[in-house]
Image (cartoon, rainbow, N blue to C red):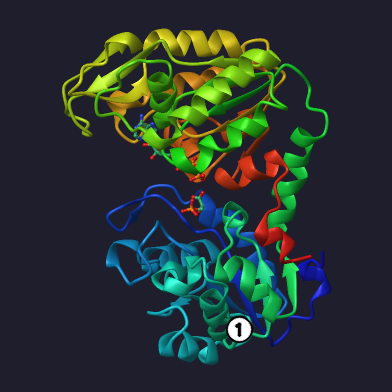
Amino acid sequence: MRTIDDLDVSGKRVFVRADLNVPLDGDRITDDGRIRAAVPTIEKLRERGARVIVAAHLGRPKGAPDPRYSLRPVAARLGELLGTEVAFADDTAGESARATSDALADGQVALLENVRFEPGETSKDDAERGELADRLARLADLYVGDAFGAVHRKHASVYDLPGKLPHAVGGLVLTEVEVLRKLTGEPQRPYAVVLGGSKVSDKLGVIDNLLGTADRLLIGGGMVFTFLKAQGYEVGSSLLEADQIDAVKGYLERAEREGVEIVLPVDVVAAEKFSADAAHDAVGVDSIPADRMGLDIGPRSQALFAEKLADTRTVFWNGPMGVFEMEPYAGGTRALARALIDSGAFTVVGGGDSAAAVRALGFDEAAFGHISTGGGASLEYLEGRDLPGIDALK
Ligand SMILES: Nc1ncnc2c1ncn2[C@@H]1O[C@H](COP(=O)(O)OP(=O)(O)OP(=O)(O)O)[C@@H](O)[C@H]1O
Ligand SMILES: O=C(O)[C@H](O)COP(=O)(O)O
């Protein structure tokens, strides 16, 4: 793969696909880790006289403009971090984008509005994605793929656009891949993978593959309830992927056959509603009330998970153990991060919210082996799957 050092960027319009999918509270950015991670590549291109056009997605809007998912606040933060103004285009590939791109001088930076406001970005239809990629290609002379957190998505700006412009891989993607490679070769054992979070349907599928490589799989977060249901427990109004229950039963059987230990919570914090001030209690997994939802793993599970991690030598963790953004449900994630540090294992934490949780809960990032910007992307890399956003750069 060509890197940005192989490109002659001076005076050229360089399209950088970054992952700037940061958590927001209204229009306040609650963790800017992904923006910080995007800065070095942009900075390097600017220094070499490029006109940098940054594109990214935010959240999962439905292929149409939605002010809740505007990247405007991100443009402001990116400008602060770069120490220069970042122009903002009100659309992604329309008139504003063209005018903004045309107005850039050497060394200047612009950010386009959320690429997912365009239905072509996430379309399953090759022609529809191709049409958007054609419009994006007209904005630039060169393409740099640096959105590590989104390289597992076969999306127009990640997968189709590099085919239409001379392209290179960005520094963030290179760094991430270099670290993750350590986990795919011969990881030091015991090797544990901890899965949590809320993108349950996305991530349940990786388990089958992980059973072939990990010695131990610890399950927390919203992922828990499909497992509990598969074991015959009632889960109240917790997150549940009902159509995955049979698949999960299969994973449990395969794990048993192959001697991979799957560690599930023994208690959860069950709340009346999805709110910080809702009534909540820790209950055994066999007694989740029908009108409550599990929003964190409970104290007995925290102790169990710490015990199961104590002797590990390598750990990959993706997905918070609970809704850490609300203090009553942050205990599981806090305890897990502490247990990882105490284990002394080589630990990779992956994912936008997982990394944000580590920082929000006050842990020192240096206490972990690596904090990756990609959650789903890292998991798919570890599975050995083809990643469209990397393949397209080859
Ligand atoms: N039991 C639960 N019920 C509902 N939401 C949960 C639960 N446990 C955790 N979460 C939520 O999961 C979210 C993070 O999940 P997600 O799968 O997106 O992780 P991530 O680290 O951001 O990975 P990625 O980079 O793939 O998005 C958090 O916002 C957290 O509040
Ligand atoms: O948050 C992430 O993992 C990446 O930004 C990709 O987002 P997505 O899961 O909505 O495609």
Name the quarter showing ligand 1.
top left
Residue in the foreground of this view, choosing between 221 and 290: 290
Residue 130 pos. (x, y %): 57, 78
Q: Quadrant of residue 225?
A: top left
Q: In what quadrant of the picture does the C terminus appear? A: bottom right
Can see residue 374?
no
Residue occupying image coordinates x 46% and y 18%: 335
Up-down relation of residue 31 to residue 329 (above or below): below
Question: In the visual, does 187 lie left or right of 139?
Answer: right
Residue occupying image coordinates x 60% and y 83%: 137
Up-down relation of residue 217 to residue 140 (above or below): above
Residue 288 pos. (x, y %): 26, 15
Which residue is identified by label 1?
137
Q: Which secondary structure lies at badge 1? A: helix
Q: How many marks?
A: 1
Query: Of the residues shown, which amino acid type is indicated by label 1?
Result: Ala
Residue occupying image coordinates x 44% and y 62%: 77
Residue in the foreground of this view, choosing between 59 and 63: 63
Up-down relation of residue 232 to residue 361 (above or below): above
Question: In the visual, does 74 lie left or right of 391?
Answer: left
Question: In the visual, does 294 lie left or right of 155?
Answer: left
